[in-house]
Image: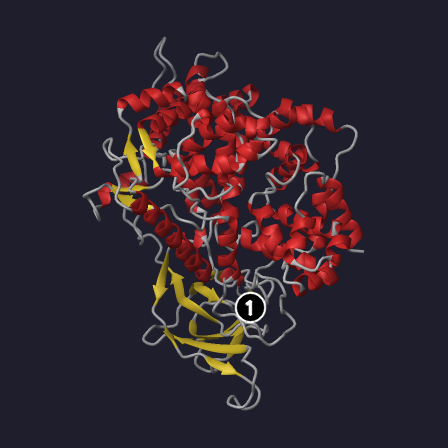
Amino acid sequence: MLQEESDLSLIIAQIVQKLKGSSLYGQLERQAWASLQRPEIKLESLKEDIKEFFKISGWEKKLQNAVYSELSVFPLPSHPAAPPEHLKEPLVYMRKAQGSWEKRILKSLNSMCTELSIPLARKRPVGEQKELLNKWNEMGTDEPDLSLFRPVYAPKDFLEVLINLRNPNYENGDSLSFRTHLGLIQVPLKVKDIPELLTFSELFENEHVRIGQKVLAEQDSAAAQQYIRQGSPTALRAELWALILNISSQPEDILYYEQLKTNVIQHDLLVDSLIYKDVKLTASNDDYYFVFEDYLYQVLLCFSRDTSVLDHFAYNSASPPKSYIRGKLGLEEYAVFYPPNGVIPFHGFSMYVAPLCFLYHEPSKLYQIFREMYVRFFFRLHSISSHPSGIVSLCLLFETLLQTYLPQLFYHLREIGAQPLRISFKWMVRAFSGYLATDQLLLLWDRILGYNSLEILAVLAAAVFAFRAVNLMEVTSLAAAEAVLADLSTLKVMPLLQIFLFATVT
Amino acid sequence: MSRVSVPCHVKGTVALQVGDVRTSHGRPGVLVIDVSFPSIAPFQLQEIMFKNYYTAFLSIRVRQHTSMHTPAKWVTCLRNYCLMPDPHSEEGAQEYVSLFKHQMLCDMAKVLELRLILRQPSPLWLSFTVEELQIYQQGPKSPSMTFPKWLSHPVPCEQPVPLLEGLPDPSRVSSEVQQMWALTEMIRASHTSARIGRFDVDGCYDLNLLSYT
């Protein structure tokens, strides 16, 4: 009992601390001050009367949503003796692997910097600033020479690192044992089995739209998250996602975005070129997303300057790259993070933003939604951790499902040198963006929000293989297998999941 | 509540195995760690804290000080406490754990020695143990102070002064003032962890290459 109580008070203290820095806190304070004019607020029962006022006026609900949001994002406080790195990632060998991977990325970026003689950051001269401000809404028309830039890494480089991940305390011998895993991932993380995954296939029934409107009217985050597990009607989706992610566009949020835009105008960063290159290579070539090219620059360039993103590194196994102001190497007062948000984009990164452009057209709102999606979900897809929604667990879940429920297919593909993960990895790292049709992708992302987990990506990947099993059994090479699975644009997500979870298993 | 670390001596781990250790192929699945407390009188145990390293189940036996006539016996105070829900997978393998006296099967009033019995039934791990073992006893209660007599034994209330016309009730005013004071103290004590938002140092963001730490 004592332990639970002290855990609870620790969680409460952490959430209070976090919320005190939010704009909601300022708003609540202002509301409380204003309420003093009201006749029902009496001095001797000040606290109780204000609480009652908050309840009636809907401010309590806003606070509840904010608390719910914090609970969803922040992991439960760990043991008081656990150091901060334990909260980022409890397993020592995974932390080390992430550290080595990060070092490789930094080396790659540094060598790009020295080879091309381009500084990591440069203050723009006034003329250039004016020019950029004028073209802010049409940065896509720019055709800078990006031929010398190359992405810092691509998903397949990251896959190689994951394949080589080993626990030094694990029996990694060649002899077959009851636990021999025939896939590429060789770390013994706990993954769910089908009975625990069945909830992912819930479909909505008749009253769904009406219930959705009611949920929106109530402005209740928790209810919205529960509701969206069955998918969202198209018309309600933008509002529902904003409610679940606890995004409300306040004037200060729009101001914050404008400040980020100013930062982009003032400083030019090397990562900007990486972003340009990525957008040109991926989203601009996509039939669905090329129209949003300008939005993508407006979001991603600002994202790189946003220091509030640094907060998520408390629970991300990754760490932001560090540097010093020129000439002040080693002096902590001159230590800075690079880029300011600590996130180095990789090949395909812009695809995390692209689907959101269908839902949000106002740049600052689009920005907020993307940022929240990144610090809640997407960061897990490109860092090494033992978290159940981390990419390592997703890979292992995918391979385990396939090996357990489609053993013939798995064995066949392995025999012809087409390990299934080599094909599905890129789908999962991008959360299927750019592979599924947009309406299907949004139904998938509904479930990610609803279940607060990325595991559905692994289940869908397995379901896709199951769906095309007959064709895959006939191929005799990796290239042929890739060809069978090249086009996912006609697939319907929910029927596929249902077939896999219910029919394949029995 | 307060707690005080008890210096302990952790004896080397002993593996329990059937048959000859040299010739058998399997790895031991049971380890025993003895913890003694030299130069400390029998104490009341408050908390045991450690960092797990791939131990699946933990049992603890305790030997306590008894009255002169009966010899001290080993008693199990924790039986098969699960540290890893699935012994074959990583969950719980490297977690920090605290065990409190209310979780123990017996009273831990006069502890002399502890014996930790670690079990890891899965053959997949090369080794297992517990690390950073710390034992805590109950800390001292807040020291008792002697108050001046007039503070601890206030004079019984005199006849209340009759209320003056037009002025508010003094007890009501005093309670309101107390409330306001408490609220202002709370606000003064609070601080936020919000970031300022600047990424540069005094307007400068001219960087060296990235550092490898």
* Residue visible at 51% across and 33% down in the picture: A370
Query: In the image, what residue type sits under mark 1?
Result: Ala
Residue at image location 31% in from the left, 32% down from the top: B198
Q: Is residue B25 above or below residue A324?
A: below
Q: Where does the image place residue A49, in percent across and percent down from the top left?
A: 49, 21
Identify whether A150 is placed above or below A386.
Answer: above
Q: Nearer the viewer, residue B128 or A403?
A: A403
Q: As displayed, is residue A76 above or below residue A125?
A: below
Quarter-of-image position of residue B18: bottom right
Q: Position of residue A469 (x, y in %)?
A: 75, 54
Q: Is residue B2 visible?
A: yes
Query: A234 left or right of A286?
Result: right
Residue at 35% over, 21% down: A131
Rendered-image quadrant of the C terminus of chain B:
bottom left
Where residue A121 sits in the image (x, y, percent)?
30, 37
Q: Which residue is mark 1?
A: B56
Judged from the image, the secondary structure of the residue bearing numbered disc 1 is loop
Residue B204 placement, left or right of A137: left
| Parent chain of label 1 | B
Q: Residues within 10 Å of mark 1 (few under 14, many from 20)?
A: many
